[in-house]
Image (spheres, grey):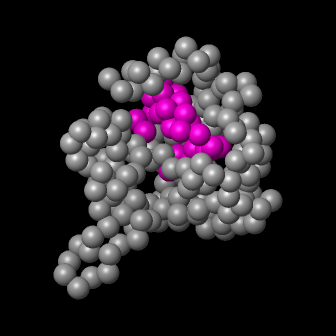
Amino acid sequence: MVKAFFRFLFKIKGWKLAPGIPKDAHNCIMLAAPHTSNWDFIYAIAALDMLGIKVRFTIKKEFNRFPLGPMISSMGALWIDRSPRKAGEERPSMTEVMADFFNHEENLPLAVLVTAEGTRSRVTKWKTGFYHTALKAGVPLCLSYLDYRDKIAGIGLCFMPTGNIEEDMRIIMDFYADKSPRHPEKFTLDHRYR
């Protein structure tokens, strides 16, 4: 129901889908950028749903309460529980928890949507947990986008991370360099990889 409403908004606001879907887009870490507005989430969920991608996103388990919990679950929430698995153990990192989702057959195929900027505000350094998660899980990185200039959304590129974060992040920065955000003043590429 919620996704249907998002698709309706996508269409009446004049958005279009870019043609083609990389074959790896159904089991991956799906990067979403630029991210400068709450509208980005709505349009990204709508676009990926219309492209046939069963996209999921992570959210803290503490939000899994009525009335929001069921609604968020219906949109594709993966509830993150970072509590220690056994008494005396340290709590797992976000990367470990996310990578572990790919180890459970009932979750597959799994496309986990991540906003690498980590915020809608301007940042000069992107978070890199998505990269380490893809490496640890052995899944590709897929680069989805919203281009507000042309009102087009799609998935442009999927690739396996090599372990050379500098080279791989340069590929990502080059891909997003010409994408137009809703609020250009809030978007910048990671200066470390330009």
Residue nearest the viewer, comparing 177 with 100: 177
Q: Is residue 48 magenta?
A: yes
Q: Residue 16 placed where, x, y %? A: 62, 20
Locate residue 89 relative to residue 115 in the image: left or right: left
How many badges with numbers are in the image? Answer: 0
Q: Is residue 85 above or below residue 122?
A: below
Q: Residue 78 placed where, x, y %? A: 33, 49
Q: Residue at x 62, y 16 (%)?
A: 14
Which residue, as the protein is rendered here, is positioned at the far top?
12
Q: Residue at x 35, y 72 (%)?
A: 92
Q: Is residue 112 magenta?
A: no
Residue nearest the viewer, comparing 118 with 156: 118
Q: Residue 151 placed where, x, y %? A: 67, 24
In the rendered image, the quadrant that contains the C terminus is: bottom right
Q: Is residue 173 above or below residue 22?
A: below
Q: Residue at x 41, y 21 (%)?
A: 5
Q: Is residue 180 above or below residue 95?
A: above
Locate residue 32 relative to residue 1 in the image: left or right: right
- Using the rendered image of the protein, determine whether residue 138 is visible from the camera's viewpoint: yes
Q: Residue at x 31, y 47 (%)?
A: 107
In the rendered image, the quadrant that contains the N terminus is: top left
Q: Quadrant of residue 4?
A: top left
Residue nearest the viewer, comparing 172 with 43: 43
Q: Residue 112 placed where, x, y %? A: 44, 47
- Using the rendered image of the protein, determine whether residue 103 is visible from the camera's viewpoint: no
**Which span is picked out in magenta?**
29-55
